Image: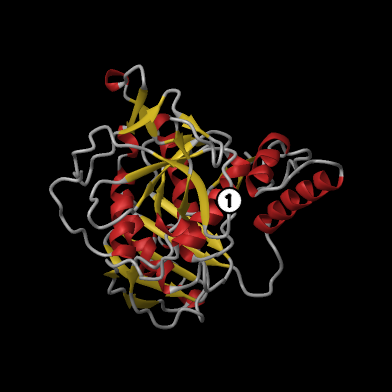
Amino acid sequence: MDRVSCVSHTCVTPDLKKRNEQVTFFIEHIFNIYNEKSINGLHGRIKYLSLWSDNCGDQFKCKYHFGWGSGFLSKKGLLAIFFNYFAPGHGKGICDSEGGISKHKVGAASLHGENLISTYDLYLYLQQNCTNVASKTCNAIHSPDLRQYHYFDEGSFLNFHPIDLKIDRINCFHSFAINRAAPTTLHSRNTSCFCQFCRIGQFQDCVDTDFNGIHHTNLMDITPVQVIPDQIDLRITMRDTMLQLRTTYGNPYLVMLFESKNISRPTFALISPGSNFHIATVRAHILDPLNPQSNYFNDCQVKIPVDGLCQLNNHNCAKKHTQLIRFDRICQICLFTTPAGNIQNAMKLVKNLCQPAYWVYDFKDTYAYMIEDYKKTRVQVFGNYEYTAVVA
């Protein structure tokens, strides 16, 4: 019999708030990898998705998970999603084993002199030292052939439920399905069946209803949640994220500030690798816009002096000096994390606008969405814009 190949994927993040928005983000990331691989291999897109997980109510076995599944099925054009849950208290599976191997590996490395300070350090070490499986059990169906690791920084996941819905009778069942014919209908049953119909989410056509019993049906009335909750604490979020960047990103980077309601365009500040961090503030260079007369919402062209920045405090010179900026005024950090876990600058050099005295930077086209993220956070925390035509 041909052996089924198994690849282990481990997602690493410093965000310790394990919740449904985090695990569904992981699932979508892994799904996109294999969907693209299937398309590039001329097999077409993935049409069916089968998920196995434990019964954790905050992550996998909750109304938000099935509501997410309904939206994901429609978004990706899937024909069905098949959800299966292990019986509570019935031992651990391959996921627990893979997690234990990774934890043991970094634990042993730390005891033998590896300098693993941040979560990103752990990810890099595992990526470099733990991808190959030392011993493969040739006759085990699910023994992994390869391990892959994926890094996601804090802020990658939603901090609120984007939908709301009501579903009754979840805990008493262990097998669920939704299909394209009725994407808002959740089929549930106490046992898992793998006949040709149940595998594609058609519990009503199961070939062994005598054993599996009649399935239960829920109609999911899914309501999108449009408003982001008010509890946005920029002081804590931005300080923690920027402290993490001190160990994971060694280059200067830009942040977008809120100064006042009279200034509609974003204000940029340059954070240097050696910036001094305090409880509520950080030292940074406040930068000038390319066009100081502009007060346009989306004007993100900013000047960085070629040789006009001074890092010294209380130093009398003609260069631009650092100022203390508050963490609770920072609405956006102009960095992004690639699927491979690399942190990169979201801004690009605009060569045709540069002058001998300064460089000009603007957002890369792919990451212009950060302007909208800045505006959304700004409005949420500081209130609506108050339009002013010109800022002197």
Nearer to me, 23 or 61? 23
Query: Height in image: 350 above or below 142?
Result: above
Question: Looking at this rendering, what residue extends furthest in the right direction?
Answer: 112
Image position of 219 with respect to 298: above or below? below
Q: Secondary structure at mark 1?
A: loop
Q: Is residue 297 left or right of residue 247?
A: left
Give percent across and percent down for residue 86: 60, 68
Query: Extreme front residue here?
Result: 316
User: Is residue 6 in view?
Assistant: no
Residue 131 horizontal side relative to residue 268, left or right: right
Residue 277 in percent (x, y) is at: 58, 51
Near mark 1 (Cα within 10 A), the count class, few <14, some 14-19 or many ≥20, is some
* Numbered marks: total: 1
Q: Amino acid at mark 1?
A: Phe
Front-most of 44 and 249? 249
The residue drawn where x is 39% and y is 30% is: 304
Question: Coloured how?
Answer: secondary structure
Residue drawn 51% across and 76% down?
190
Q: Quarter of the image holding residue 149?
A: top right
Q: Is residue 207 above or below residue 13?
A: below
In the rendered image, the vertical position of residue 129 relative to residue 99, given as above or below: above
In the picture, the quarter occupied by the N terminus is: top right
The residue lying toward the viewer, choosing from 372 and 77, is 372
Taking the spot 35% from the left edge, 77% from the top edge, the residue there is 217
Q: Quadrant of the C terminus?
A: top left
Give percent across and percent down for residue 385.
21, 58
Image coordinates of residue 71 in percent, x first then y, are 32, 60
Q: Is residue 382 left or right of residue 319?
A: left
Residue holding disc 1: 277
Query: Is residue 233 shown to the viewer in this render?
Result: yes
Residue 87 found in image quarter = bottom right
